[in-house]
Structure formats: structure tokens, C-alpha cells
């Protein structure tokens, strides 16, 4: 178990969201974009013409995930980082109350033939997914489950 970081930023612009993703997960990451009519999982460098602008999404690497939700013209952002000490510019984030630690887990990816999911998600070639649980030690509850790139 490691000391983790969970923080938020409210009402950020698309430009600021792009900066946060570049700063915290980098360009060698993957992203998952979600719209009511479609989903897309791909390398961050292969983003759609709209960039990060989607109803919801997440960008992730081996240690960090950033989630966003579109609210009007701006975005609410959640940062889930494995190691609190390695988070840059912590003062820019409103740290969520809790005694956070994380645990790494395996992730199950559904087969392409699975029909119970409403939209098919195709796993990019070369990507091996894992999960990271973010647990508040005070309660023992898993509060967030983040995607991670397994090495």
C-alpha cells in the first residue's frame, strides 16, 4: 500500500484541462472518451478532432488518472495519483478529505463478442490494463477505481 493523492478542480476551461492532462499523465498515456452516442479508448496522442472535449473522459498512465466531466462550457476534474509525494503543484488541487492509499489489481477486459455492453470498446494494440483502488484508510472503503497502464 502507498500514500495516494485524490484531488479536484472545479470549472476549468478546455485549455486548462489539456494542460492538466499533459502535466500529470503526459502524452504517452491513454484516454477514454465518452459521449452518449459513442465511446473511444485510444492512445492520448490519437485523440479525436474535438481533443479532450467529451461529455466525460479519463486519461491515464501507469501511476495517475485524470477524469473530467463537461459542465456547461467548463469541466470538473478529478486527479487520482498513486504517490502523493510525486504530484506536482498539489496546491492547485482541492485535496479530498481522507487518509488515502492505493492497491493495484488486475483488470478484466470483456471479449469483443460480449453482447451485454451497450457499446463495443476496442482495446488498442499493445495496451495492457490494470486497476488501482483508492481506499480511505479511515473507513476501509474503496472510493475510486482507476484505470492504469500495466507495465
Image (spheres, helix red, strand yellow):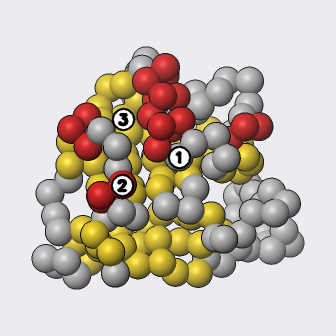
Residue 139 picture quarter: bottom left
The residue beneath circle 1 is: 25
Q: Position of residue 141 (x, y in %)?
A: 26, 77
State the residue in front, 132 or 22.
22
Q: Give the crowd class for mark 3: few <14, some 14-19, many >=20 residues within 10 Å.
A: some
Residue located at (41% from left, 73% from top): 133
Callouts 2 and 3 close, C-beta under 8 Å: no
- Mark nearer the N terminus (2 vs 3): 3
**How far apart in space, not on screen, are marks 2 and 3 (Cα)?**
22 Å
Which residue position is annotated with label 2? 86
Residue located beneath label 3 in the image: 76
- Return the disc, 1 or 2, that comes first in the chain's sequence: 1
Residue 1 at x, y percent in the picture: 34, 81
Residue 34 shows in the view: no
**C-alpha distance separating marks 1 and 2:** 12 Å
82 vs 80: above or below: below
Above or below — where is 134 with respect to 35?
below
Amino acid at each position: 500500500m502507498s500514500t495516494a493523492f485524490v484531488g479536484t478542480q472545479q470549472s476549468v476551461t478546455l485549455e486548462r484541462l489539456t494542460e492538466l492532462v499533459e502535466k500529470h499523465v503526459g502524452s504517452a498515456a491513454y484516454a477514454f472518451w465518452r459521449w452518449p452516442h459513442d465511446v473511444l479508448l485510444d492512445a492520448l496522442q490519437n485523440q479525436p478532432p474535438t481533443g479532450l472535449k467529451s461529455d466525460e473522459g479519463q486519461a491515464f498512465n501507469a501511476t495517475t488518472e485524470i477524469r473530467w466531466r463537461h459542465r456547461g462550457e467548463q469541466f470538473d476534474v478529478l486527479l487520482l495519483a498513486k504517490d502523493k509525494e510525486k504530484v506536482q503543484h498539489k496546491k492547485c488541487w482541492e485535496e479530498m478529505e481522507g487518509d488515502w492509499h492505493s492497491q493495484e489489481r488486475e483488470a478484466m477486459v470483456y471479449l469483443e463478442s460480449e453482447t451485454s455492453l451497450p457499446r463495443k470498446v476496442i482495446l488498442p494494440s499493445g495496451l495492457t490494463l490494470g486497476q488501482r483502488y483508492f481506499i480511505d484508510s479511515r473507513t476501509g472503503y474503496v472510493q475510486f477505481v482507476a484505470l492504469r497502464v500495466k507495465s
